[in-house]
Image (spheres, grey):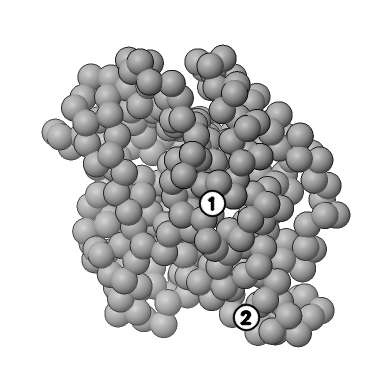
Amino acid sequence: MNFAIVPLFNDSLVENKSDSARLVSYYEMPPPPHLAHLVFCFFELAFSESKAPTIYNVLPDGCMGILIKFNRNSPSPPIVLVRGLESEIFEAKVECGDKYWGVRLFPAANRLVLGADPGKIATSPLVHLPQLNALRSFLETKLGAISERKDAFKLLSDFFESLEINPDDADRQVTSAITALMKAGGNLSTDDLLSGIPTARRTLERRFRKNVGLGIKQYSRLYRLRATGLSLISDIELSWADRAAMMGFSDQSHLIREFALITNRTPTELAAEIGIHDFGDLETPKD
């Protein structure tokens, strides 16, 4: 199970120990302070060159991303992809030696960064997304110089700096809502969320969807699933009933239904997939 596009680790290695899978390495770096209102993290996801092509499962987490796909063994140049806001698990084919350098956007900045309705952007190579011409023109002309992680992170940083988007340009109430939901692991009702944000419910919901691309309840649901996935790694001995209560589900049956709807798996099946990975020194996101 791919948690590599979820901000769970710092400098960690992920090893899939099943006979048919591959060594997967993952590196994550927080953004510099002046980009933190746009970027949640930069990351590298790399697949061993010693294994056969396989299918990698990507868990939805309510976040968009920009990724550069590179393979040192392939004559094809690097390509840029945008990750959309899928609401269900999806499969990605990976080849021997594939590397993904990317950035996870801070959700409140989705529209600001992409200059388009984030809810209408599906996961796709950049060439298939004409509404993102500015992003393509900046990145694709410079991909030839990319061969290492530091080069990719520098190029992505340069792109975000070129946008000249200041923190005050973002919707402060949506930013506050996202921050509160992240701190609560997605387990925060709209009423509780509104208690700390001075605006009407419909106004916040409209502005949230416009900037993030998801409704508040949709985003909360996906983020809570992400937080539950983290608990499967960090608290493996926790009972399902206690886990459901800790993560804010009404009961164990509620947790099972949510997993089935979004991942097409039972929690036990998902835990088994997660359990064959070594996540190194797992750390939760910093507030």
Q: Which residue is mark 2?
A: 190
State the residue in front, 29 or 171.
171
State the residue in front, 216 or 192.
216
89, above or below 75, in the image: below
229, above or below 125, in the image: below
Q: Residue furthest front?
A: 130
Which amino acid, mark 1? Answer: Met
Residue 55, position as x, y percentages in the image:
24, 41
Which amino acid, mark 2? Answer: Thr
Total number of numbered discs in the rendering = 2
State the residue in front, 197 or 167.
167
Viewer-side label of 1, 2: 1
Left or right side of 217 for 18? left
Proximity of marks 1 and 2: CB atoms separated by less than 8 Å: no
Residue 75, position as x, y percentages in the image:
35, 15
Whether residue 150 appears in this view of the structure is no
Q: Which residue is mark 1?
A: 64
For the point 66% across and 67% down, which residue is it? 210
For the point 39% across and 72% down, which residue is it? 244
Whether residue 134 appears in this view of the structure is yes
SS for callout 2: helix
SS for callout 1: loop
Q: CA distance from mark 1 to mark 2?
A: 22 Å
